[in-house]
Amino acid sequence: MGVLDGRVALVTGGAAGIGLASALALAEAGADVVIGDLNAEAGAEARERIVGLGRQSLFIATDATDEEQVAELVARTVADLGGLDLALNNVGRGELGRTVTTTTLESWNAILGLSLTSTWLACKHEIPAMVERGGGAIVNMASSAGVSPQVTASPAYAAAKAGVVHLTRYAARQYADVGVRVNAVAPGLTLTRRVEAWFDADAIAEEVADSQFVARAALPAEVAAAVVYLCSPAAAMVTGHTLPVSGGVR
């Protein structure tokens, strides 16, 4: 028996990195899992891995910044799997080497769209589906950059993730009385393929040594464990909270 048996979960950005690790962890805990992502090949592979764990799964190609596609993602989840109980909203990206004065308007708008607007759109369509089921749990992907200023994070990314933190608290307060809990996780530097492509091992070691109590990068599975906890009955009294998974960022 898994702690999430009988639940239906939706993971945006679930084809790779923290999203994939979370989708697999939710399935291992007993949930059926729908993956929304733009990467069709990786999404199909993720679906097969979830099915291999004995759970139902769908992959639905989705641009998380397009409201029609997000609405369709939620609608298909409900139609094909019978409802929606849990969600991880995990779409976003940053950039390196930008400051407040060197960030372009094009980049600013793109990063806020991917990292903040996508989260709002997902919540907008997930919450009514959860209310129909009598409640549910949403986890939004924030970042330690949205909690504490970090010069290695771009200003657009930091601002977007700070927005995710506040959106999370806002939604938690507004929908607590209808049984929908809304929390966030705030990872620090995490060893995804994207991070490993951006930084070499020495740069990662230097970054965490200077900025964290625990001097190593997090693993995607460690962030996924926090996601499962926030989705589980063990977190029934946890809402509006942003849970750092960052080794004690200074």
Image (spheres, rainbow, N blue to C red):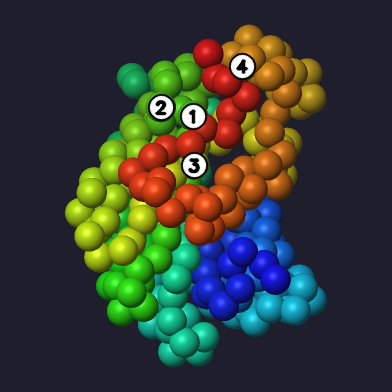
Disc sitting over residue 147 in the figure: 2
Residue under pointer 1: 144
Distance CA(mark 4)–CA(mark 1):
11 Å
At x 52%, y 52%, the residue is 234
- C-beta proximity under 8 Å, tags 3 and 1: no
Front-lying residue, 62 or 27: 27
Residue type at the position of mark 3: Val
Which image quarter: residue 216? top right
Q: Which one is nearer the viewer's eye here, 183 or 42?
A: 183
Please state which amino acid type lies under the numbered disc 1.
Ser
The residues tagged by marks 2 and 4 sit, at their Cα atoms, a distance apart of 14 Å
| Mark 1 vs 2: CB contact within 8 A | yes
Across and down, in percent, residue 192 comes to 69, 43
Please say whether residue 203 is visible from this viewpoint. Answer: no
The numbered mark at residue 212 is: 4
Q: Distance between the residues labelled 3 and 2?
A: 11 Å
Q: Where is residue 45 in the image (x, y as percent from the top left)?
A: 74, 71
Q: What is the C-alpha distance between the residues marked 3 and 4? A: 17 Å
Numbered disc total: 4
Note whether 200 is above or below 58 in the view shown: above
On residue 184, the disc is: none
Secondary structure of the residue carrying tag 4 is: loop
Q: Is residue 40 left or right of residue 28?
A: left
